[in-house]
Image (tube, helix red, strand yellow):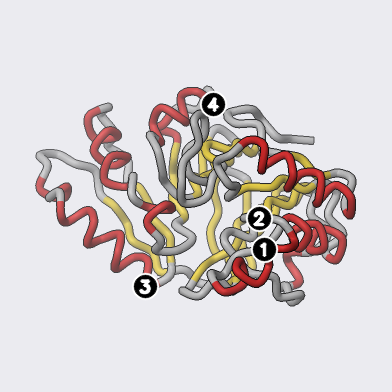
Amino acid sequence: MIVYVLGSTGSIQGREASNTSLAVTSAGRTLLIDVSGSPIQALKRSNIDPLSVDVLLLTHAHIDHLYALPSLIHQMWLMGRTADLTIVANKETIEVAQSLCALFSLAEKRGIFAVNWQVAEEGRAAVTVGKMAITLFSVPHGIPTLGCTLEEGDEKVVYLADCKSSGSYPPCAWKADLLIHEAGGVAEEEERLMKSGHSSARQAAEAALLLEAQRLVLVHLPCDEGEQGRLLSEASALFGATELPRLFEPYQR
């Protein structure tokens, strides 16, 4: 199981980074988590074959997490994809995503591959990709939002998606080798962040400590690189094994 960060910013893109999205590969197959920027280009920059994507997980229906979906499907079709694509999301997110695809009449393209829309079932091994089991769970964000735990053998990766600090996590989120957690600002901004369903860098570090994670990667960051440095310093003061994301590079044991 290999994790790639394809984009790392919050709602406003940075000079080098698009909005937060991830790719995870296992046994030659790929899980894509959210779609922003140019997903085909991001996959290629990570040396991932875009046609190896079996499952797309959409965490929630905010624009920065799904606006590139029509482009992804259209380009896969142009590249000659014939295999079905499974899109997993909660009911509310599927409705928004389907409306977005319908706007561009994607289903009417000649010979286009089938898209299988799967309403998320929370619980252990709700989805599999390659040899990787994917467990879905809800996180608090203001609208219905999914986090996920990815497991292959004894390796575990947890992505908490966009979420405010709650102190309450499902059992599957504990003891991750890699925890990927949003950080939209620093501690003095926590009141504002909480109102919009987000967390500070300090709260991300607290989650890593509580969940007994081995490493913490901060995502959904402000686009300013100097501000990102402040977030890293704040989180690292509590949880030393904190990192800013390395785009398009593999994370593995």
Element type where label 1 sits in the image: helix
Distance from Cα at disc 2 to Cα at disc 4: 28 Å
- Quarter residue 210 falls in: bottom right
Please report the residue visible at 66 percent of the width from the left and 43 percent of the height from the top: 227
Distance from Cα at disc 1 to Cα at disc 4: 34 Å
Distance from Cα at disc 3 to Cα at disc 2: 27 Å
Q: Name the residue under label 4.
A: 46
Kindly identify the amino acid type of the residue bearing the numbered disc 1: Glu
Distance from Cα at disc 3 to Cα at disc 1: 29 Å
Mark 4 vs mark 3: which is more N-terminal? 4
Q: How crowded is mark 1: few (under 14 residues within 10 Å), some or many (20 or more)?
A: few
- Quarter residue 173 falls in: bottom right
Kindly identify the amino acid type of the residue bearing the numbered disc 4: Ser
Element type where label 3 sits in the image: helix
Q: In x, y percent, where is residue 161?
A: 58, 58
Q: Mark 2 points at which residue?
A: 185
Kindly identify the amino acid type of the residue bearing the numbered disc 3: Glu
Mark 3 vs mark 2: which is more N-terminal? 3
- Mark in the foreground, 1 or 4: 1
Q: Name the residue under label 3.
A: 92
Q: In this view, does 152 lie to the left or right of 78?
A: right
Whether residues under marks 1 and 2 lie with C-beta atoms below 8 angstroms apart, the answer is yes
Element type where label 2 sits in the image: loop
Mark 3 vs mark 1: which is more N-terminal? 3
Q: In this view, does 45 lie to the left or right of 116?
A: right
Whether residues under marks 1 and 4 lie with C-beta atoms below 8 angstroms apart, the answer is no
The reply to whether residue 182 is visible in this rendering is no
Residue 189: numbered disc = 1
Mark 2 vs mark 4: which is more N-terminal? 4
